[in-house]
Image (tube, rainbow, N blue to C red):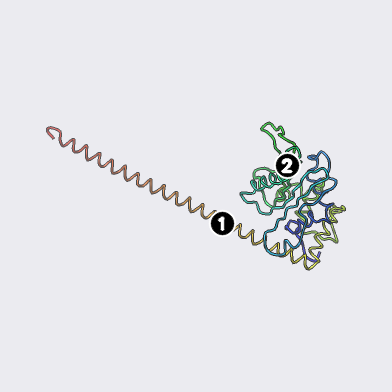
Amino acid sequence: MRHPIDPKIDCVFKALLGAEANRRLLIHFLNAVLGTDLPAPVAEVAILSPYNEREFQDDKLSIVDVKARDDHGRVFQVEIQLLVLPELPARILYGWADLYSAQLQSGQDYGELKPTYSIWLLGETLRRGLPDYLHRLRMRDDRGRVLIDHGGICLLELDKFAAGPGAAREVETELERWLKFFTEGEGLDEQALPDWMQTEEMREAMSTLMTFSEKEREYHVYQARQNYLRRQRSIQRRLGELDALQAATEQARAAAEHERAEKDAALEREAAALAEIERLRRLLGDQPGA
């Protein structure tokens, strides 16, 4: 490629999985991620939010998730999020619930609801303390019994995959192939692709990266989105630094107030002790024969 292209940048990601020309890639990706979660593989999909490069031409926040419905009526959402913010878990759940409930139009009943699946690729760690990069979340009770088998949420933490043994070993599953592509795709040379990229789907995905690399208009869109995301990351880091500074300031203020309160209390105890000594002296002075 003339320019290295990161498949995790939102406009590239949506072109990979949300373009009408790449519907086969989306089907392959959904089956690779959801696998045995599906009673039947995805065979055909209608993309509900197709890729449109004009969405990304300005440095504005675009809707970059991919929404699709398959021939069984099941609904799918695929989204990439490079920054993990504190409100992300609520956003993920709200997005799934909104997509699930949006199926019903006026006059329809609950029996017409179809399973809904949300897949999130995360650029940073969300579930700290857990080594696994793949998390499948379903509606279950505290004994693991499913309330209703109507899909769920799948989280893929790319940084854990990149740092873990899954990235270093030979690719064994189609899911690992996709995750390796998203984590290493920017450094690939289309003239010397590694063995794990030698499949029809991966060559097709690589072709999409080459489009962004070689065509001036698409590369301009890519650069604009990359610059926008860089600014967003810089702003978020600065906000994080300011939040940490504010927390440290509040902690120091609280410690100072506590120390001041302790000193005031000590002075009050000392004054009370001196007053008691004076009172006892007066009592002794009032005794007969003193």
Position of the N terminus by quadrant: bottom right
Image x and y of residue 96, in percent: 70, 45
Where in the figure is residue 269, as x and y percent of width and height? 32, 42
Q: How many marks?
A: 2
**Location of residue 32 in the rendering, given as x and y in whole percent from the top left corner:** 81, 46
Say few, some or many: other residues with alpha carbon within 10 Å of mark 2 (under 14 / 14 to 19 / 20 or more).
few
Identify the residue at horizontal 58%, vertical 59% (top origin). Answer: 238
User: Which mark is drawn over residue 241?
Assistant: 1
- The residue to which callout 2 is attached is 107
For image coordinates 70% across by 50% down, the residue present is 122
**First reached walking from the N terminus: tag 1 or tag 2:** 2
Closer to the eye: label 1 or 2: 2
Q: Nearer the viewer, residue 140 or 241?
A: 140
Residue 88 position, x and y percent, is: 64, 49
Residues tagged 1 and 2 counted as in contact (Cβ below 8 A): no
Quadrant housing the C terminus? top left
> What residue type is disc 1 on?
Glu
Identify the element where label 2 is drawn.
loop
Q: Quadrant of residue 229?
A: bottom right
Closest to the observer, 233 or 120 = 120
Query: Real-space Cα distance between discs 1 and 2?
Result: 51 Å
**To which quarter of the image does residue 146 belong?**
top right
Secondary structure under tag 1 reads helix
Question: Where 176 falls versus 209 (above or below)?
Answer: above
Residue 286, quarter of picture = top left
Q: Label 2 is placed on what type of residue?
A: Gly
